[in-house]
Amino acid sequence: MRRCHHPSKATGYTLVELLLTVSLVALLVGAVVFNFSSAANGARLNEGAGQVEALFRFARAHAETTGRQVRIQFPEAESGDTAEVLAAEAPGTTVRVTWEADPIGAPGVFQDLPEAATYVQSISGLVSIQQVQAEVAGADLGVGLGDLEAEPGSLSRSGVEGGAELGSFVTFFPDGTGDSVEVLLTSRDEEDARRLTLRWMGITGAIRRQIVAEVESAESEPPAPATEAAAEAVQ
């Protein structure tokens, strides 16, 4: 009895199936990359805010431990002559940390605090701080500190008498207290348009963080209708 051997049909993928598979894989890879990039952009702003919070806590602890005032200054929020001085002394920095190293021999003289260099470098690479609001005597002023000046004979925020200018800074005192301040943070990444406010309560050391919604551009108001008198004047 003769057996018939039928040749087996070759199995494989058609060109259309291969193209469809490649397209699906490309879409999946693109979606993963997009989600990863978005998460990375958002993480930079959040990490920067966390570093600022850590710096505030460090400055408060350092002032309490050493018995010396510690000051955090915000060069990007300064204006006028102070901004030029800070740009020359600390170029490209978001924050500058100084302390009153010798309050008896050199009162009111603040020097850079080396122990805070790591915080300064990390924060400057992650976020920018261009707006600072302060609370003086329990009242929220809601304006940039660089625009304020103490009245003659009053106490400045650093506790020094006279009409010294109140720069854009927050001071931490040896008793564990400090100035209350609210700063507006933006990411160094241009693709992340979010803004974040960080509020430090100087007495308690509490911190509040809040994402600020983007401000939509206000539509231009339509011009007011011309009056008859104005029309006659034009003619």
Image (tube, grey):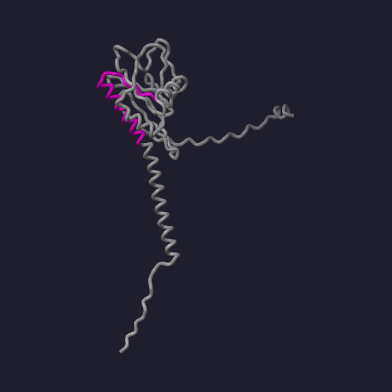
Q: Quadrant where the N terminus lies?
A: bottom left
Q: Which quadrant of the structure image shows residue 54?
A: top left
In this view, the residue farthest toward the left is 65
Q: Residue at x 32, y 88 (%)?
A: 2
Residue 125 point in image, percent of width and height: 38, 33
Residue 3 point in image, percent of width and height: 32, 85
Residue 25 point in image, percent of width and height: 40, 56
Q: Residue at x 38, y 71 (%)?
A: 11
Judging depth in this view, the residue of 202 and 171 nearest the camera is 171
Q: Is residue 116 visible?
A: yes
Q: Residue at x 32, y 13 (%)?
A: 107
Q: Residue at x 38, y 20 (%)?
A: 136
Q: Which quadrant of the structure image shows residue 17?
A: bottom left
Q: Is residue 141 visible?
A: no
Judging depth in this view, the residue of 196 and 65 nearest the camera is 65
Q: Which residues are magenta?
A: 47-74
**Prevailing secondary structure class for the magenta stretch in the rendered image:** helix
Judging depth in this view, the residue of 73 and 220 nearest the camera is 73
Q: Is residue 160 above or below residue 215?
A: above
Residue 34 point in image, percent of width and height: 41, 47
Q: How many marks?
A: 0
In this view, the residue farthest toward the right is 235
